[in-house]
Amino acid sequence: MEHRTNFKSRNANMMRITLKIKWVWMLLLVVLLPDKMLKAQQDAQFSQYMFNGIYINPAYAGYKEQLNLHSFYRSQWTGIKGAPRTFSVAVDASANDGNVGLALQLSADKLGAQSNLSAYANYAYRIRMNADGSSRLAFGVGIGAVQLGIDGSLLNPNDPEPDQPTGTQSTLLPDARVGVYYSDDKFYAGFSADNLISQYINVDRYAYIPQPKPHYYLTAGVLVPLSESILLKPSFLLKDDRGGPTSLDLNAFFLLGEKFWVGGSYRTGVKLYDKSYLQKDLSNQNSAVAMVEFYASSSFRIGYAYDFSIGPLQNYSGGTHEISIGFFFNKNNVRMKSPRYF
């Protein structure tokens, strides 16, 4: 009799979990299906996203199951005037026995005369897929705002337009992003989308401020033990904005003695569907990236990435530098049942 009761209880729990998953997928479909081809800028690009997925997916919040403070700075295309500069900081933690993830993310991005600021508060509901909680399926949402601005004094074109701003223009837009993220001890996969609200708010009154558009991120990776002290982590990231070229990152990293991540990425353009409106002679080659991350202690790590331009900019750019730092605050020095490699 007790066995039947336990079986019914487990069956009821699985039905509740399945129902929750169906409702979240319905919400994602409602948000993501509308498709408007709008003129817009690409979101800021960075290379060390595989060390903290919160930058591209709100469902990653709480994955490490400890208080995690992370920041990075990126100086892109050194030597080119007005090249992109990006700074971001994020803090995330878990709550409710690891079933909830919370995160706050702030970013600042500058490209020539354009400057963008964004802030998101993220919430993730993390469903246990096995008894010890090492396998989880998370659904996340981020609510926040983006400030888009332009400094007209930096435009200085040879033939000024009649509506060219002479001073600074800016606008503040509400925004949201959503994502889903699965992880276990050896594998992870995620899908996310951003600019889901700001894309519908018309900024035409600001002639030189680009209209935001949605960006989509699909990522996955595995962990392969090569020996007791060496692990291999291959992964990929596919990025698309339904307007510009689709980008694919192919990554491979080695973890040496639980202290060093060493590896790199190859970034290239791919064709998934018809984009005949794009310039015909666009090069698919973008960059190759060399990266290292060092665990200085159990609570501090530092990373560095160098992007080599292998496309049309290779003769004009001194490359791209990106540095990141992370702090972990493990409550009462509790050791996690499963190390967090993703």
Image (cartoon, rainbow, N blue to C red):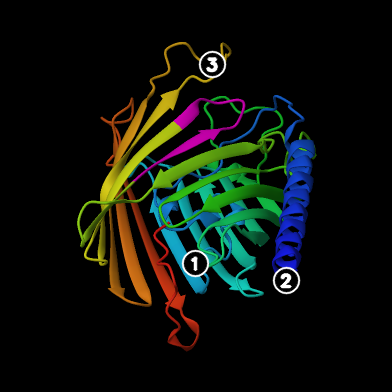
**How far apart are labels 3 and 2 at the CA level?**
65 Å
Tell me the tag on residue 64: 1
Instruction: Kindly identify which residue carries mark 3.
Output: 278
For residue 247, side relative to residue 42 (left or right)? left
Q: Is residue 203 above or below residue 142?
A: above
Q: Nearer the viewer, mark 1 or mark 2?
A: 2
Which residue is located at x 45 percent, y 83 percent? 334
Q: Residue 214 location, x and y as percent?
A: 66, 37
Q: Nearer the viewer, residue 54 or 150?
A: 54
Q: Amino acid at mark 1?
A: Lys
**Quick one: label 3 or label 1, which is nearer the N terminus?**
1
Tell me the tag on residue 2: 2
Q: Nearer the viewer, residue 90 or 8?
A: 8
Q: Amino acid at mark 2?
A: Glu
Q: Residues within 10 Å of mark 3 (few under 14, many from 20)?
A: few
- The answer to which quarter of the image holds residue 119 is bottom right
Q: Is residue 102 visible?
A: yes
